Amino acid sequence: MKANSGQFKKGHKTWNKDKKCPHISLAMMGNKIWLGRKHSEESRTKMRIGVAKQIRKTGEQANNWRGGIFKRDGSYVFVNVNGKYQRQHRVIVEKRLDRKLKNGEFVHHINFNKHDNRVENLYLFRNRASHVKYHAFLKRNGLDGTNNQLTSNLFIYV
């Protein structure tokens, strides 16, 4: 690379020679020339109404509504509950226990399939530490988690 690359060299023609402020628009220069199309008041009103209709299409009225459920690859299934998306497995456990889950409680998928949200496949851990200990136990003993001692009884904590 040259030591003075990017600098002006004597005798060279500049890139913007014979150009009137190419980096500044005519509106910024205060020029009276209008290059765009002027819309009538009627067409501007129609455009505003069209935009307003698009904005109102949310939730069930939206064209891409999928029943309030969506899945992310490698992640959990989310479900719409009262206008807020929550993880489906947590909602299922809350309904089964008939109470809200505490912040520290963890729902574990027994077969490690995050999209399998059957009650038989869900297990509730009291806190993060017990959930981490369980996974350490599986790893230490070379288990894959499918043939383990967990039951599907949500009322038993590890």
Image (cartoon, rainbow, N blue to C red):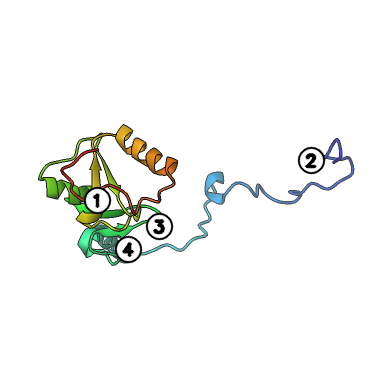
Between 5 and 104, the one lying in front of the other is 104
Helix, strand or loop for disc 3:
loop
Helix, strand or loop for disc 4:
helix
Between 77 and 136, the one lying in front of the other is 136
Which of disc 2 and disc 1 is earlier in sequence? 2
Report, in whole angstroms, how far the alpha carbon at label 3 lies from the one at label 2. Answer: 47 Å
- Tell me where residue 71 appears, x and y as whole percent: 33, 58
Residue at 26% of width from left, 59% of height from top? 69
Which of disc 2 and disc 4 is earlier in sequence? 2
- As drawn, the residue found furthest toward the right would be 11
In the picture, measured across the screen, residue 151 lies left or right of residue 99, that is: right
Residue 73 is marked as 3
- Tell me where residue 36 appears, x and y as whole percent: 49, 61
Residue at 40% of width from left, 51% of height from top? 144
Report, in whole angstroms, how far the alpha carbon at label 4 lies from the one at label 2. Answer: 47 Å
Which of disc 4 and disc 3 is earlier in sequence? 4
Which of disc 1 and disc 3 is earlier in sequence? 3
Helix, strand or loop for disc 2:
loop
Which of disc 2 and disc 3 is earlier in sequence? 2
Report, in whole angstroms, how far the alpha carbon at label 3 lies from the one at label 1. Answer: 20 Å
Report, in whole angstroms, how far the alpha carbon at label 1 lies from the one at label 2. Answer: 64 Å
> Which mark is nearer the camera, 3 or 2?
3
Q: Which residue is mark 1?
A: 122
In the picture, measured across the screen, residue 148 lies left or right of residue 124, that is: right
Within 10 Å of the Cα at label 3, are there few (<14), some (14-19), or many (20+) other Cα atoms?
few
Residue at 26% of width from left, 63% of height from top? 62
- Tell me where residue 38 appears, x and y as whole percent: 42, 62
Q: Amino acid at mark 2?
A: Gly
Residue 158 is marked as none
Report, in whole angstroms, how far the alpha carbon at label 4 lies from the one at label 1. Answer: 51 Å
Query: What is the tally of numbered marks visible in this picture?
Result: 4
